[in-house]
Image: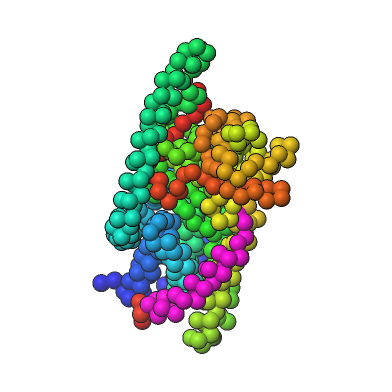
Amino acid sequence: MAPKFKARVLSTTKIIKNISIVSILLLSFFLVLFSKSDYILINSIKNFTSSFINPLTKVVSSPVRFISNINNEYIQFKNLKFENKILHEEIIRLKKWQTLAIQNTRENKVLKRLLNATDNNLKLIKTASLINRNQTFYSNMININAGYEDKIEKNMSAINERGLVGKVIETTSSNSRVLLVNDPNFTLSIKTVSDEIFSIVTGVGDKKQLVSKFIKNNNMPKVGDIVVTSGTAEVFPVDLLVGKISRVENNRFYVLPFVDFNNIDYLQIVTSK
Amino acid sequence: MISKSIKNYIIFNLILFITFSISVNSFVSIENINVISYIIFHISFIYFIFYFYHFSLFFISFFYGVLFDIFLLNSVGVHLIIFLILTLLFIFFKKYLLLMSSYQIGLLIYFVLIFIFFFEFILAYFLNNIFFNLFEFGKYTVISLIIFIPTIFFLNKFNK
């Protein structure tokens, strides 16, 4: 009786093993097939990773973060003298600009009253801080500590004091994922401030600049022109600062974003009014 | 008392989770740490499949495949496919692979590693439209070459 029983137990284990392997393979197949859609399973996996695995990876990688911070502090300390000199010069320059800005603000208010114009087209949803970065070969994304509980939705724009940072591509209850402007899968419609040349730009492989994908009427801008969001695609609010033209070639141009993507601590999630 | 093989199994799982955690978090002032960690994860994973065959490897492949895809690409595909195919291939050819000498196994792990990176880059291009960058691939190959022997040495130490 004993060997028979043992043989039956063994075969049951084998069957369970085979069933679990087949189910994993089937589940993987369906996950890959429906990964780009908004199915509940995919969304719940994304929510789970964002809410539980992400904080866990942050805790596990905290020693590296600690070393990275020490290294950062050392580099900053080394550059302190040089930065001090630059900041001194910048303060003098900014004081001049401040006087001019105060004058312009006053003038603006008067002109707006005369034209009966509204203030600006942006509605602030939430100011959030950075949780961690996923800036790898595959993508340029960051995670922030605000989600749909803070009324953040997909495709909302993320900005900081320097201009457009990216757009929200994923939200969970308390976290959101922002795809940065310099990601090769990011497409943005822009216009130049000076000549209003409309075009579409996208991130480049080096993840430092943006390159034009389409230029309306083939009008080429000049190097140094400032570009802002055009608002034509109705994804981003109009007139958000993007960057300036850094290089113009035969049938394309490059834009250097104003935002320093390595130094993002806080950002604002905004939408059009 | 935990048996030695279970202890090793837990240690290797810890190695996988730690390297995974570091590779999905970018650190601005230590530029290549996540690339190095990503490579160590892959080396450990291949080593793990080679020396610790258990059917739970399918769950591990599934788990890390999905997590890598969601963290790095925001859609499931590239890593999940590669990890599962790799696990299946190793199981199919296990009886031939075990006949190899340690030198041949080392070489095999290195070449499998490079092939994995190559196919991951290619799949990322087809599934997620991520530009295949030869320079990046070269960087991964060179870093792999540098850290391969020390990593294998440490993994062998853990797995006496």
At horizontal 47% and vertical 44% (from top left) the residue drawn is A259
Q: Residue A62, can we see it? A: no
As drawn, is B81 to the left or to the right of A174? Answer: right
As drawn, is A156 to the left or to the right of B160? Answer: right
Main SS, magenta region, reads helix
Taking depth in this image into account, of B111 and A214 the one nearest to the observer is A214
Could you say where residue A3 lies in the image, as x and y percent from the top left? 45, 74
At horizontal 37% and vertical 29% (from top left) the residue drawn is A99
Farthest residue, direction right: A217
Taking depth in this image into account, of A233 and A169 the one nearest to the observer is A233
Farthest residue, direction left: B1
Q: Which residues are magenta?
A: B130-155
- Identify whether A216 is placed above or below A252: above
| Residue A98 sits in quarter | top left
As drawn, is A35 to the left or to the right of A250? Answer: left
- Identify whether B112 is placed above or below A186: below
